[in-house]
Image (spheres, helix red, strand yellow):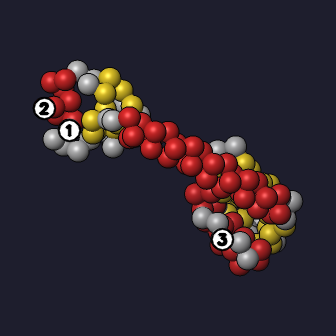
Amino acid sequence: MKLIFQKEVQGVAKIGEIKEIANGFARNYLIPRGLAVQVSESQINAQKDKVKRDEKKREKDLKGKEVLAKRVDGAQVIIKAEKKSGDTLYSAIGAGKIAEAIVAQLKFKVSAADIVLDTPIKSVGAHEAKIKFAPTVFATVRVIIS
């Protein structure tokens, strides 16, 4: 029996996938739980159209993120922090503080989860942090700790 999956079924299929499934498994498990529906020719065409629309939308979003990344790339953010003796900081500067500084200074909304740091910043001076817009789109921001 050919089915279109409405929800992901681990080890079987992903959302929107069209697969040939054993009749008993389809009738007794997948269809009653709303995990899949039996396909017709019109549903197959509608699913293909939906996949094309979703792909175009993803491409448009990715292009928008690339433009935004180019605009932010190379920007500079200044963070004031207390320091101990020498150039070491009293407390480390993490992704959360960097995200707050970017929002305040660059007027650009970003969350701490989008900031990529190898290690928290523990010294005064210039450092670099990356902002992850998409899995393949990054921008580098210069973080100056004073």
Of circles 2 and 3, the one toward us is 2
- The alpha-carbon separation of the residues under discs 2 and 1 comes to 7 Å
On screen, residue 111 versus residue 50, left or right, reads: right
- Quarter of the rendering occupied by the N terminus: top left
- Alpha-carbon neighbours of circle 3 within 10 Å: few (<14), some, or many (≥20)? few
Q: Which mark is residue 28?
A: 2
On screen, residue 39 versus residue 146, left or right, reads: left
Of circles 3 and 1, the one toward us is 1
Q: Is residue 54 visible?
A: yes
Residue lying at 64% horizontally and 61% vertically, measured from the top left: 94
- The alpha-carbon separation of the residues under discs 3 and 1 comes to 42 Å
Residue lying at 64% horizontally and 60% vertically, measured from the top left: 95
Q: Secondary structure at mark 3?
A: loop
Judging depth in this view, the residue of 71 and 62 nearest the camera is 62
- Alpha-carbon neighbours of circle 1 within 10 Å: few (<14), some, or many (≥20)? some
- Alpha-carbon neighbours of circle 2 within 10 Å: few (<14), some, or many (≥20)? few
What amino acid is labelled 1 in the image? Ile
**Residue 60, horizontal then vertical, whole percent:** 68, 54
Q: Which mark is residue 109?
A: 3
Q: Which mark is residue 31?
A: 1
Point out the tag, 3 or 1, that comes first from the N-terminus: 1
- Quarter of the rendering occupied by the C terminus: bottom right
42 shown above or below 1: below
